[in-house]
Amino acid sequence: MVIVVCGPGGVGKGTVVARLVAEDPRLWLSRSWTTRAQRPGEPDDAYTYVDRATFERHVAADGFLEHAEFLGNLYGTPWPDPDGERDVVLEIDVQGAQQVLARVPADQVLFILLEPPSPEVQAERLRGRGDPPEQAEKRIEVAQAELAAGRALGAVRIVNDDLDRTVERVQRLIAERRAGGG
């Protein structure tokens, strides 16, 4: 199964996914690539950081399941290569989710759209993780369109207003899908 956790920047995708993977050994996190600079305090393994030319060569070689440009930077998910025993978790944006849904059979995808409790909370989270103010503003501007696109794709929507409750809800969805439901 491929578990797609998507949503606009500052919604808490990384925090939710980190908890899911830490608590469930049957999950394998695919590490995305990016051409953006590493944020202050961001772990070295948050992404595979590459230059634009390297990224574009990987695109040309069909090395990504999905890829997109966002606010001038490239982001992409390499084709997953788990050990065959675990479910793949993708922490991506809505553009990427659209591509995954076009390339992976729908019955093999659990598509979850995380939503912020409010634009104000989202902006606070963006600033808290080190986004420059102008970048945070741009992310807030595009968030409504991203949320609308995710909703139109039929994602399971979860408002991330309480981390524990959000993680528990996603864990229930995964358990239901593994059991053959939903």
Image (cartoon, rainbow, N blue to C red):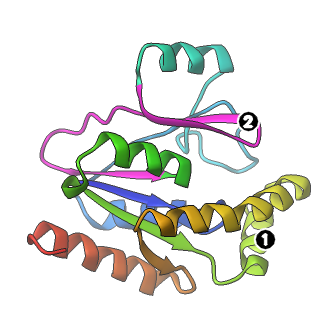
Residue occupying image coordinates x 61% and y 24%: 50
Badge 1 amino acid: Ala
Residue occupying image coordinates x 85% and y 61%: 137
Q: Main secondary structure of the magenta part?
A: strand
Q: Which residues are magenta?
A: 64-91
Q: Which residue is mark 2?
A: 37
Does residue 169 appear anywhere in the picture? yes
* Residue projecting furthest to the right: 134
Location of residue 155 with respect to 74 vertically, above or below: below
Residue 88 part of the magenta-drawn span: yes
Q: Earlier in the sequence, mark 2 or mark 1?
A: 2
Does residue 93 appear anywhere in the picture? no
Picture coordinates of residue 121, whole percent (x, y): 73, 79
Relative side of 20 to 24, left or right: right
Give neighbour class at mark 1: few <14, some 14-19, many 20+ (Cα, 10 Å).
many
Picture coordinates of residue 33, whole percent (x, y): 54, 33
Picture coordinates of residue 107, whole percent (x, y): 19, 57
Residue contact at pointers 2 and 1, CB within 8 angstroms: no
